[in-house]
Image (cartoon, grey):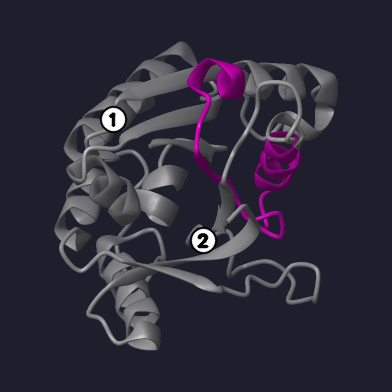
Amino acid sequence: MRIIVFAPHNDDEVLGVGGTIAKYSASGHEVFICEVTKGDSDEMVNMIRSEALNAHKILGVKETIFLDFPVVQLRETPLKDINFELLKVVEHIKPNIAFIPHKGDMHIDHAVVSNSAMVALRPINSVNVNAIYAYETLSETEWNIPTVDNAFIPNVWSNITGFIDKKKQAMNCYKSQIKEPPHPRSNEIIEALAKLRGSTIGVAYAESFMLVRETL
């Protein structure tokens, strides 16, 4: 299978899908990461993209695609431009499964990418995705105003018991992003959430998702 993960910012893919990415890769599937925004300066862009490639190597990612949209400015960017670039990625990869950020996350970039990804993943022309899942991103999903529209309600779980160490190793590559606990973007809290999600399905560690669409 071919799997695409859309990440509004570098490190979102590890926080939300890192263990599942490693699991897919270990099973011989091809995983592609699309990083939608870039940093504020050339120095930051080069540093964080190097961190991303190191993290993706640990997870077994086949290809990383970097787009050049401005961070924290997606709401001011014409949607047609974002939709067009994400559609190009989908048409290039022809994924069977897609992971997108949760539309209710606090960061507006997450909502924009979620909506544009759904436009790109419409079941028309050559696009034929079997399943779309929304992932949770620590420090974004849980920090927004708690309303019905914003709630992350998981209904799909991925057992990552054998891959939690790879997820944490990948996160360690993001030296510019990782924090010390109790900040949620830390390996201690990443592991704690994975334990909580795992307890729901009776395993040691898991990642959880919201099913957006699935074709049986």
Q: Few, some or many C-alpha atoms within 10 Å of disc 2 (few <14, some 14-19, many ≥20)? A: some
Disc 2 marks a residue whose amino acid type is Ser
Q: Which residues make up the magenta segment? A: 89-118
Question: Which quarter of the rendering shows the N terminus?
Answer: top left
Q: Residue at x 46, y 46 (%)?
A: 12
Q: Position of residue 96 (x, y in %)?
A: 50, 38
Image disc number at residue 66: none
Q: Residue at x 57, y 49 (%)?
A: 131
Where does label 1 land, which residue?
51
Outermost residue, top side: 42
Disc 1 marks a residue whose amino acid type is Glu
* Residue 13 falls left or right of residue 214: left
Image disc number at residue 139: 2
* Residue 41 falls left or right of residue 153: left
Q: Are marks 1 and 2 in contact (CB under 8 Å)?
A: no
Q: Position of residue 132 (x, y in %)?
A: 59, 49
> Which one is nearer the viewer's eye here, 65 or 186?
65
- In the image, is residue 41 above or below residue 133? above
Is-magenta flag for residue 98?
yes
